[in-house]
Image (cartoon, rainbow, N blue to C red):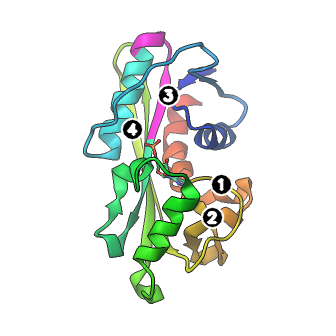
Amino acid sequence: MEIVIASKNLGKIREMQEILGNRVNLLSLSYLSLDIEVVEDGESYRENAEKKALSVSALTKKPALADDSGIEIEALDWAPGVLSARFGGDINYKKKNQMILELLSGLPVEKRKARYVCAVCLAYPNGRIETAEGIVEGIIAEEPKGKGGFGYDPIFYYPPMNRTFGELSPEEKNRISHRAKALCKIKRFLI
Ligand code: IMP
């Protein structure tokens, strides 16, 4: 089954393909030689995911899958949330992670609560949509650890596994992540 994936983030595309398995073939926008920019101006993950999936499905006339996700940190009033990709401006994730560690510097573990949230939307060319959400709770670590995953993973410590997401193997992350939880709910509409 072919589904267009409305994302340019290679880390996310790789994870989504692994979670969905080989019965679903995710076609990237670059594979289809398409370069569309959907402005993520929604106030919620759900709104952004639905907007992206509907636009790409209408354009390609194929089912399209989109996700919108972010990290929410209690000590920052649950920011950056939907603005996670833009946090700190146009700087790399090593610097974004460093900024967060500095903002939380000196805070004890009970004040370092964080969560990843993800909304996934599957849209069909006739306008039908299925949307699901997933959340995973953790703690902002004292220092970055691990080279796995992407984005904020080196500073997102996951107590049940006693490691940061950056230290998990792809299989381990894809069993428990916010994206995996949301995608598993969507998977039953596909297979
Ligand atoms: P968007 O969904 O592409 O708008 O951006 C989501 C942003 O949230 C990513 O660019 C990362 O900054 C962050 N994010 C979401 N999910 C993850 C994850 O699994 N690991 C690390 N960072 C994530």
Mark 4 nearby-residue class (10 Å; few <14, some 14–19, many ≥20):
many
Comparing 191 with 146, the one in front is 146
Does the residue tagged 2 have its C-beta within 8 Å of any atom of ligand 1? yes
Q: Is mark 1 within 8 Å of ligand 1?
A: yes
Part of the protein shown in magenta: 58-67
Q: CA distance from mark 4 to mark 2?
A: 25 Å
**Secondary structure at numbered mark 3:** loop
Would you place residue 111 above or below residue 189 in this image? below
Q: Nearer the viewer, mark 4 or mark 2?
A: 2
Give the mark nearest the N terminus, 2 or 1. 1
- Residue 6: give its label: 3
- Percent position (x, y) of residue 62? 50, 14
What whole-number distance in Å separates the C-alpha atoms at marks 1 and 4?
24 Å
Of the image marks 1 and 3, the number of the one nearer the N terminus: 3
Q: Are marks 2 and 3 in contact (CB under 8 Å)?
A: no
Residue position marked by numbered label 4 in the rendering: 131
Compare residues 76 and 28 and report the one nearer the observer. 76
Question: Which residue position is annotated with label 2?
Answer: 165
Alpha carbon separation for disc pair 2 and 3:
24 Å
Query: What whole-number distance in Å separates the C-alpha atoms at marks 1 and 3?
Result: 19 Å
Say which quadrant the N terminus sits in: top right
Q: Is residue 16 left or right of residue 81?
A: right
Q: Which residue is depicted at the point 38% across and 26% down?
A: 38
Going by the numbered disc 4, the residue's amino acid type is Thr
Residue 141 covered by magenta stretch:
no
Q: Secondary structure at mark 1?
A: loop
